[in-house]
Image (cartoon, rainbow, N blue to C red):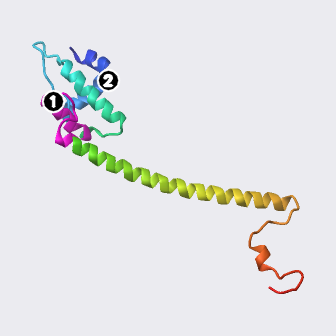
Amino acid sequence: MRIGELAKRAGTTTRALRYYEQLGLLPARRAGNGYRAYGEEDVRLLRQIRTLQDFGFGLEETRPFVECLQAGHPHGDSCPASLEVYRKKLSELDECIARLEEVRSRVSEQFARAERERDALAAGAAGEPPQCEWAASAAPDRNTGEW
């Protein structure tokens, strides 16, 4: 098949295919007429690349999966190098999730504080005395005058 048909079947552009070829991810075979020629194995390679990119893998991270398929394995993640890329990506994702959880916690704390301040200001504007949890313990007892 020619490059246009491969691009259509793989859900990408001919420009992307040329770029993958330039990076060595897609083999460049030429027909007798000089046109690029591709087969079903190239569709499999591109589907593997696209799936990994959809998961957030960079093009270089797809290389071990592509090489695994090119070596004749039924799946791009059948090889040790591919498994190592998975392992590394999972570690990166775990770190990212931990950072996001920390940021979420801090934003949640800021949000709660801002709501409390807004409520206190609204209560003050309505003529109500501000409600402070510490105020009762910071004033002298009304009956005895003692702190």
Vertical comparison of 67 with 13: above or below: below
Is 99 or 137 nearer to us in this picture? 137
Decide if residue 77 is on the left or right side of residue 109. Answer: left
Other-residue count near label 1 (Cα within 10 Å), few / some / many at <14 / 14–19 / ≥20: some
Instruction: Give coordinates of residue 54: x percent, y percent.
Output: 36, 34
Q: Quadrant of residue 20?
A: top left
What is the x, y in percent for residue 64? Answer: 19, 38
Query: Does label 2 or label 1 sit earlier along the sequence?
Result: 2
Closer to the camera in the image, 28 or 104: 104
How far across and how far down the image is residue 102, in percent? 49, 57
Judging depth in this view, the residue of 123 and 140 nearest the camera is 140
The tag on residue 137 is none
Residue drawn at x 30%, y 18% is: 9
Task: Look at the image and give the residue range highlighted in magenta.
Answer: 61-82
3D distance between C-alphas at marks 2 and 1: 26 Å
Decide if residue 57 is on the left or right side of residue 32.
Answer: right
Residue of label 1: 73
Q: Give me the disc on residue 13.
A: 2
144 lies above or below 59: below
**Helix, strand or loop at disc 2?**
loop
Q: Position of residue 127 (x, y in %)?
A: 88, 61
Given the image, on which type of amino acid does mark 2 rest? Answer: Thr
Q: Does the magenta stretch include residue 62?
A: yes
Q: Which residue corresponds to the image point at 74% horizontal and 57% vertical from the top-left?
A: 118
Residue at x-position 22% and y-position 45%: 84
Front of the two marks 2 and 1: 1
Instruction: Determine which quarter of the picture holds residue 109.
Output: bottom right
- Disc 1 marks a residue whose amino acid type is His
Neighbor class of circle 2 (other Cα within 10 Å; few <14, some 14-19, many 20+) is: some
Assign the N terminus to one quadrant of the image. Answer: top left
